[in-house]
């Protein structure tokens, strides 16, 4: 087994915004063909190898028994053609056409909890994006993560601003981050362990815009993924590397010709 990668020992007194962390795009997609599959292993597998920031997209799909199950997905049809959706047991349920369902939400949460149980000085961030059935996602997070879910002690004076927390303050916790829509679907979200994420990268501006010291969650400056014209794994990795170099210099993807 690969020796686990740890951040705490070397960087425990560093704030989150002072440490470069490995992230995972479409983190739950371990199935499908070369145009769909994005990862070789689940959340635990990736976390052991150093990933701490997980991009997760959740929707409901019918399983073989006809029950609606919350799962990760990589599928443009789900996002762009609502005609493929139906209502079932209080959830919006979709049918994949151009993509693939991935790991179930329960599996993602259970593996995240298993990792911080195994390495209690480490932490994970689950960033939920392009998702639906937010109240069901929230309930699953509560039920599965239990006391491992990160809850800030206060919202005042930037107390819920994850950017300003040290790695030592985050240890042993799974940080749950919803987008604006999901966050607004939860009553007193920060007190229940639901925080918010925001990408400050604006293509119309040359610097990060709109940073808020009182923001209840995580703010970052970046652009995940690469465009389709990048052919093959090596080309995609190189293109992503080039984009990240520009971002580290304070320039966005808009600066490229």
Image (cartoon, rainbow, N blue to C red):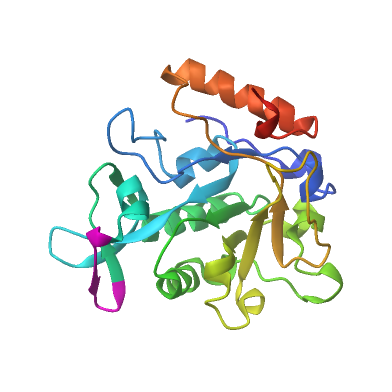
Residue 249 horizontal/vertical position (percent):
80, 29
Figure check: 155 above or below 120: below
* Depicted 168 relative to depicted 254: above or below: below
Above or below, comparing residue 47 to residue 254 in the picture:
below
Q: Is any part of residue 61 visible from this angle? A: no
198 displayed left or right of 231 = right
Instruction: Locate residue 115 relative to residue 137 in the image: left or right.
Output: right
Residue 85 location, x and y as percent?
25, 63
Extreme-bottom residue of the structure: 187
Quarter residue 90 falls in? bottom left
Q: Is residue 1 visible?
A: yes
- Tag count: 0
Q: Residue at x 65, y 49 (%)?
A: 122
Q: Which residues are magenta?
A: 83-91
Residue 242: in magenta span:
no
- Drawn side of residue 229 relative to residue 204, left or right: left
Name the residue nearer the viewer: 58 or 110: 58
Determine the residue positioned at 35% across, 60% down.
Answer: 59
* Image x and y of residue 147, in percent: 58, 71
Q: Quadrant of the C terminus?
A: top right
Q: Nearer the viewer, residue 151 or 67?
A: 67
Q: Is residue 14 left or right of residue 234?
A: right
Quadrant assignment, res 26:
top left
Q: Residue furthest left?
A: 65
Q: Nearer the viewer, residue 116 or 158?
A: 158
- Front residue (pair 168, 78): 78
Q: Residue at x 55, y 34 (%)?
A: 49
| Coordinates of residue 31 in the picture (x, y in percent) | 30, 38
Q: Residue at x 50, y 56 (%)?
A: 129
Residue 5's image quarter?
top right
């Amino acid at each position: 087994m690969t020796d686990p990668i740890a951040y705490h020992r070397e960087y425990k007194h560093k704030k989150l915004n002072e440490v470069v962390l490995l992230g995972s795009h479409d983190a739950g997609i371990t199935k499908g063909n070369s145009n769909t599959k994005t990862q070789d292993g689940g959340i635990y597998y990736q976390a052991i190898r150093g990933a701490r920031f997980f991009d997760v997209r959740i929707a409901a799909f019918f399983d073989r028994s006809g029950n609606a199950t919350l799962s990760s997905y990589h599928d443009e049809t789900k996002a762009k053609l609502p005609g493929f959706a139906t209502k079932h047991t209080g959830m919006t349920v979709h049918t994949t056409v151009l993509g693939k369902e991935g790991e179930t939400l329960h599996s993602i949460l259970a593996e995240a909890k298993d990792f911080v149980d195994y390495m209690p000085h480490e932490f994970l961030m689950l960033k939920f994006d392009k998702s639906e059935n937010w109240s069901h996602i929230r309930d699953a997070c509560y039920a599965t993560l239990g006391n491992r879910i990160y809850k800030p002690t206060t919202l005042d004076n930037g107390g819920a601003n994850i950017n300003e927390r040290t790695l030592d303050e985050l240890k042993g916790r799974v940080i749950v981050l919803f987008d604006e829509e999901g966050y607004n679907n939860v009553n007193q979200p920060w007190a229940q362990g639901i925080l918010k994420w925001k990408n400050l990268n604006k293509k119309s501006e040359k610097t990060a815009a709109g940073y808020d010291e009182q923001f209840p969650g995580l703010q970052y400056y970046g652009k995940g993924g690469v465009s389709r014209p990048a052919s093959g794994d090596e080309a995609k990795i190189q293109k992503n590397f080039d984009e990240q170099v520009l971002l580290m210099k304070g320039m966005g993807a808009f600066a490229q010709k």
